[in-house]
């Protein structure tokens, strides 16, 4: 069997590598090729291009690199069609992958999207492209399936890959350390620079009232720890920078201040009460308000369908409000929130997302083979 896999960013590379490993367990002789990063290459992906070739940050850089990206997309398309895979699995990165899906579909290659682009939040018009060119969408958030059903797209919820990643911790959770707070300021430097100073100052305010307070700054994968330590500066023994075994260190915390994003689901699965922090440049925020249509900014509240965790958004993200949120989380509201987080974790389901995704991909391959035999 031949499988084309295209992952255009680091998180997609991780999810796609786990999927490829699950496919190989079922079909050891499988040949895989496409676009990936280090993790996919470790799993034996033959690379037409690397994730790093697609990574462009900033509007000016995108315009500057448009000719190179266009040629890269054309080369990946041509090589993929020439290899005639039994199925193409496109992971997230809709700006690169949805145009590719159109060409693969026209060449008779069934396309599966793994990790749905967040069409339910913005640019919903792109769902027409998916309906026309994609055989099946494998969702990692449970509410996404209904969105696609309404739009006439075959979609299935396979579970969130985080459940597999966190299983070693959730199966043997550490003891909770009362009075220990986690700070998760994001996975990109522009987030860290915007959020971390306010988080640190809020903790210093609370530490004056709670002398036993201890704070762990949890470093996201890929962030340079030396640069993070520089951001923390000389603030005494209150702060500890954590890089290794980050999930176990987080699970032991009493409460957390968390950048909006996947880290909020990490806290939910690990049962760590949190306040979610989100701040953009004012012009970017004004534009986002016009384009993005969701009732909450955090994935936890979106999965829950209600506001179970406080959201400190834009002007509400201040030192005094962050400190007040921490006080409440260290008190009774944190314990109450744990019940809501347990409900979110149950909605996400059980570990095994990669295995279920692999089974769904093989179903598409089997359906194609049956259709060809019948014709």
Image: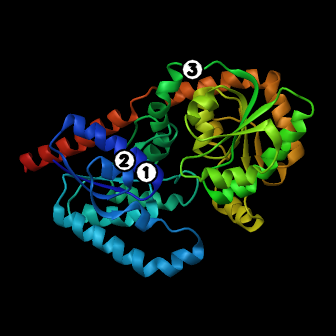
Q: Is residue 279 visible?
A: no
Above or below, 307 relative to 340:
below
Q: Where is residue 189 in the image (x, y as percent from the top left)?
A: 64, 58
Q: Where is residue 308 in the image (x, y as percent from the top left)?
A: 71, 32
Q: Position of residue 222 (x, y in %)?
A: 54, 52
Q: What element carries label 2?
A: helix
Q: Is mark 3 on a helix, strand or loop?
A: loop
Q: Do the residues labelled 1 and 3 touch (CB within 8 Å)?
A: no
Q: How crowded is mark 3: few (under 14 residues within 10 Å), some or many (20 or more)?
A: some
Residue for badge 2: 16
Distance between the Cα atoms at labels 2 and 1?
6 Å
Q: Residues within 10 Å of mark 2 (few under 14, many from 20)?
A: many
Q: What element carries label 1?
A: helix
Q: Can residue 371 be seen in this view?
A: yes
- Mark 2 or 3, nearer chain start: 2
Q: Is residue 227 left or right of residue 9?
A: right
């Amino acid at each position: 069997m031949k499988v084309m896999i295209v992952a255009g960013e680091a998180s997609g590379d991780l999810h796609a590598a786990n999927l490829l490993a699950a496919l190989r367990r079922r079909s050891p002789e499988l040949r895989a090729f496409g676009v990936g990063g280090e993790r996919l290459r470790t799993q034996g992906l033959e690379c037409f291009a690397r994730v790093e070739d697609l990574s462009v940050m900033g509007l000016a850089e995108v315009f500057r690199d448009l000719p190179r990206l266009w040629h890269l997309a054309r080369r990946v398309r041509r090589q993929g069609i020439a290899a005639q895979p039994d199925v193409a699995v496109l992971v997230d990165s809709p700006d690169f992958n949805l145009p590719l899906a159109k060409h693969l579909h026209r060449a008779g290659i069934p396309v599966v999207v793994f990790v749905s682009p967040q069409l339910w939040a913005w640019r919903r018009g792109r769902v027409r492209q998916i309906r026309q060119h994609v055989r099946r969408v494998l969702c990692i958030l449970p509410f996404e399936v209904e969105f696609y059903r309404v739009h006439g797209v075959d979609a299935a919820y396979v579970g969130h890959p985080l459940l597999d990643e966190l299983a070693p911790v959730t199966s043997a959770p550490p003891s909770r350390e009362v009075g220990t707070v986690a700070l998760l300021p994001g996975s990109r430097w522009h987030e860290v620079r915007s959020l971390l100073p306010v988080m640190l100052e809020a903790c210093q305010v609370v530490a004056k009232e709670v002398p036993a307070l201890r704070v762990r700054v949890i470093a996201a994968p890929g962030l340079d720890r030396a640069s993070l330590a520089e951001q923390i500066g000389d603030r005494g023994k209150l702060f500890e920078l954590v890089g290794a075994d980050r999930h176990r260190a987080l699970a032991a915390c009493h409460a957390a201040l968390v950048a909006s994003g996947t880290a909020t689901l990490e806290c939910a699965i690990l049962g760590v009460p949190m306040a979610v922090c989100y701040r953009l440049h004012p012009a970017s925020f004004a534009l986002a308000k016009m384009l993005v249509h969701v009732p909450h900014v955090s994935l936890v509240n979106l999965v829950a369908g209600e506001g179970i965790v406080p959201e400190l958004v834009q002007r509400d993200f201040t030192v005094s409000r962050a400190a007040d949120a921490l006080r409440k989380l260290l008190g009774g509201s944190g314990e109450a929130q744990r019940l809501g987080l347990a409900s979110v974790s149950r909605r996400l389901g059980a570990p095994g997302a990669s295995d279920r995704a692999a089974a769904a991909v093989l179903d598409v391959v089997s359906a194609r083979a049956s259709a060809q035999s019948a014709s």
